[in-house]
Amino acid sequence: MENTNEWLNQMHLLSRGLMRPRSFLRVAGIVFVIEIIALAFGIAFFIITSSLWLGLRWFSLYWQPAYFLLFIKLADIRDIPPELSKPDLPWYRIIILLIKAAIVLGIFYLGVNILIKQGFCGQSLICLTIQNQQ
């Protein structure tokens, strides 16, 4: 029971650091620009980047490279210790992580599958607009 409380305290510290107004606006702005650019390239790219962002958010608390990218690089939060990214997980959290990984991989596969079947010009807003003008 103490292990679960320690894990919840660590997650509270991380979420409190990420939800600072400056950090939140910085991350939201970066994600917004990336998603708009991906949507301009097509729905498949939008789905792929959305799945990567979802995976980054979900796994940043458990995987050191994702933690470094999200909290240190994008959110510019330097006062959260890196050892918080590897908490001692209860067994049911591992099952939840596996389900989340399956969801992220499924969404990523959907985007790649659309890109393979439709091709770039079959799903790209830029390409469809140029073809309609000719």
Image (cartoon, helix red, strand yellow):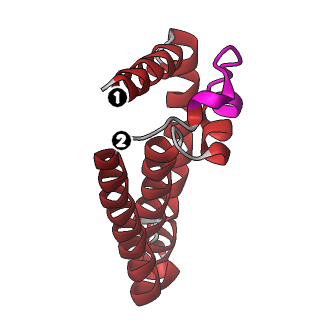
Identify which residue, 75 or 80, lies in the foreground.
80
- Asked whether, in this view, residue 119 is left or right of residue 114, the answer is right
Q: Which mark is residue 4?
A: 1
Q: Is residue 81 magenta?
A: yes
- In the rendered structure, does residue 35 fall within the stretch colored magenta? no
> Which percent across, then down, holds residue 42?
45, 65
Q: Nearer the viewer, residue 43 or 126?
A: 43
Q: Residue at x 47, y 41 (%)?
A: 57
Using the image as rendered, state which of residue 86 and residue 104 is in the foreground. 86
Whether residue 28 sits left or right of residue 98 in the image: it is right
The type of residue carrying mark 1 is Thr
The outermost residue toward the bottom is 117
What span is in magenta?
72-84
Q: Left or right? Give the position of 76 relative to 133.
A: right
How far apart are labels 2 and 1 at the CA level? 7 Å
Q: Earlier in the sequence, mark 2 or mark 1?
A: 1
Q: Amino acid at mark 2?
A: Pro
Give the residue number, with chain letter if any, for mark 2: 90
Q: Residues within 10 Å of mark 2 (few under 14, many from 20)?
A: few
Quarter holding the N terminus is top left
Query: Measuring 49% from the left and 16% from the top, which residue is drawn there?
Result: 13
Q: Are marks 2 and 1 in contact (CB under 8 Å)?
A: yes
Quadrant in which residue 105 is drawn: bottom left
SS at circle 2: loop
Q: For numbered disc 1, what is the local secondary structure?
A: helix
Residue 47 x/y as whole percent: 40, 62
Establish if 12 lies above or below 60.
Answer: above
Question: Horizontally, is 23 left or right of 97 in the view?
Answer: right
